[in-house]
Image: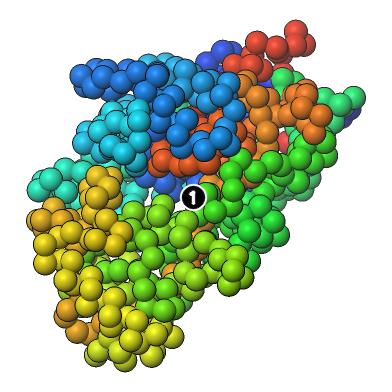
Amino acid sequence: MQWDLDFDIVCVGSGLGGLTAALTAAEHGARAIVLEKYELLGGVSALSSGQLWLGSNHLAEAAGIADTEAAAEAYLGHLSQGFATPERRANFIRRAPEALRFLTDTIGVEMAVVRGLPDYYFPAVSGSQAEGRYVEVLPFPADRLGDWADKVLTSPYGDGYSFTTSNEWVEMQKGGTPVGVCLLRHVEAGERCAGAGLAAAQVLAARDRDVEMRTSTEVIDLVLDDGKVAGVIVRDAKGTHRIRARSGVVLATGGYDWKADYVRAFDALPEAGSMAPPTVSGDHIAMAAKAGVIPVPARAPSQSPIFVGYKVPAETVYGEPSYRMWLPGAPHCIAVNAAGHRFANDAFYPDVATKVARFDGQEQGQPNWPAWIVFDQNMLDKYGMLPGWPGQPMSEGMGVTAATLGELAVAAGIDAAGLEATVARFNRFCEDGVDHDFARGSVPWGRIMTGDPRLPNPNMAPLEKAPFHAVKIERVTMGVPTAGLPIDTNARVLAADGLPVPGLYAAGNSAAWLDIGGGYNSGIANTRGLLYGYLAALEMIRTRSADAPADTQGVPA
């Protein structure tokens, strides 16, 4: 076969999965190339909170936080609801701490445990922890990247997400420095935080290890040689090229947010918005099909972490309509259906997200869809509604506003009597801070992440100050899919017959969630990128052929 470029390992995608695979390969003397379809490096993980979630780990231990593999097994076993395989779950629990230590001790990425942030389902679920399982990157000085600083993705949403840390958020909720102050401090210092900081740290490490990284480079096909994945075909501004992968190809392209057919087929959603770059379009599924791989769902669609959010008509991002995720739980704000009724613990997004997807077999319909966020002027004044900051008006065209709840209901298409009765009932609950319908404010994670610590119940305050506002809820994805490519415990992609496809690996959201199953906890998606990128590279190094060193002559960078 004729090749334009020759590498040991080809990583498709520049998120945590692709970059970790390349870094691991480079540390073991292999030549790696990272190919990114988008114009910037970092992938979906660069837009995330940057949290990693994992059980007993060295950062928590150093902070004096006790944890065990058995506790993590109990917690993840409950989350799986039978959709994960025990051997894959055990592998995740056992090897994720190893991958984290590689990232910190070998690669040199500075990380810290997030203090005071509990698991989603603490304390209700056996094995859950009050803290210690979330870790995040320390603020990263962007000037260390030099000319590469402009090549790494930060949040395009103007919400400061790339310039605050989870630790700062938790501290603010305990009465510490406001996040806005921290944000300005990091911006003035030229520091990147969260997923953007983690991406920047990995890109710097990859550059220093001579990993080749190319953007605006689309991988359009796998090259098979007698059943083995031998390389890829790419398309860039200079044309089409063939790149050899002596040891293998890692597919780490994320989910399939922008492939409507896949979203409909796998997630059972007729339509959904996305905050991921439009290049996240399921390329891994199309490519792997050539090798006999069938994508598999790892959970019921209703269990998938499809977030709730809303559309911002006055704003475009990536040249597409803008959407924002909504973390419910701010005081002076509730979620209601068309009948005007609350239907979930609207201070805990997993409950809202699954309840809007509920299907009523008797009625043959979805009683909680469509749904709306309803709030008063107090909420806008105190907490804001992105892209607006506290005290700013709601973005034009994002929702409706009225002087009374009855008028608001008519304008939004909500039953007026139902909404008025619901708000009156909720306001009575706010008097003693106890939600007798849905236990709002009872989940510690929700209290910390979305509440106001100055209130007796951080998630509850009445809707009483006119004008009143309503925003229609949309389903919003962020690269975490229902289906993916099945992999084994070494990140090898499995064909329809259950056997590994020689030379093909997957990491992160491209890999089916057969290790976690039905449930979700923030940070797990990022950990799966780190872990399976690491394991894929280790497996390729272990099985690397004794061919001559890669010839890097060919198409110039």
How packed mark 1 is, by other alpha carbons closer than 10 Å (few <14, some 14-19, many 20 or more), is: many
Would you name the residue on which mark 1 appears? 305
Asked if one can make out residue 296 in the rendered structure from this viewpoint, the answer is yes
From the viewer's perspective, is 480 left or right of 76? right
Q: Residue furthest top?
A: 546
Residue 185 in the image: state x and y as whole percent.
19, 48
Which image quarter holds the C terminus? top right
Residue 116 in the image: state x and y as whole percent.
21, 36
Q: Is residue 196 above or below residue 347?
A: above
In front here: 266 or 535? 266
Residue 39 in the image: state x and y as whole percent.
56, 50
Residue 250 in the image: state x and y as whole percent.
65, 31
Say which amino acid is labelled 1.
Pro
Which image quarter holds the N terminus? top right
Q: Is residue 59 above or below residue 49?
A: above
Q: Residue at x 40, y 55 (%)?
A: 351
Question: Which colour scheme appears in the figure?
Answer: rainbow
Q: Residue at x 18, y 72 (%)?
A: 427
Q: Residue at x 69, y 47 (%)?
A: 283
Asked if one can make out residue 325 in the rendered structure from this viewpoint, the answer is no
**Callout 1 secondary element:** loop
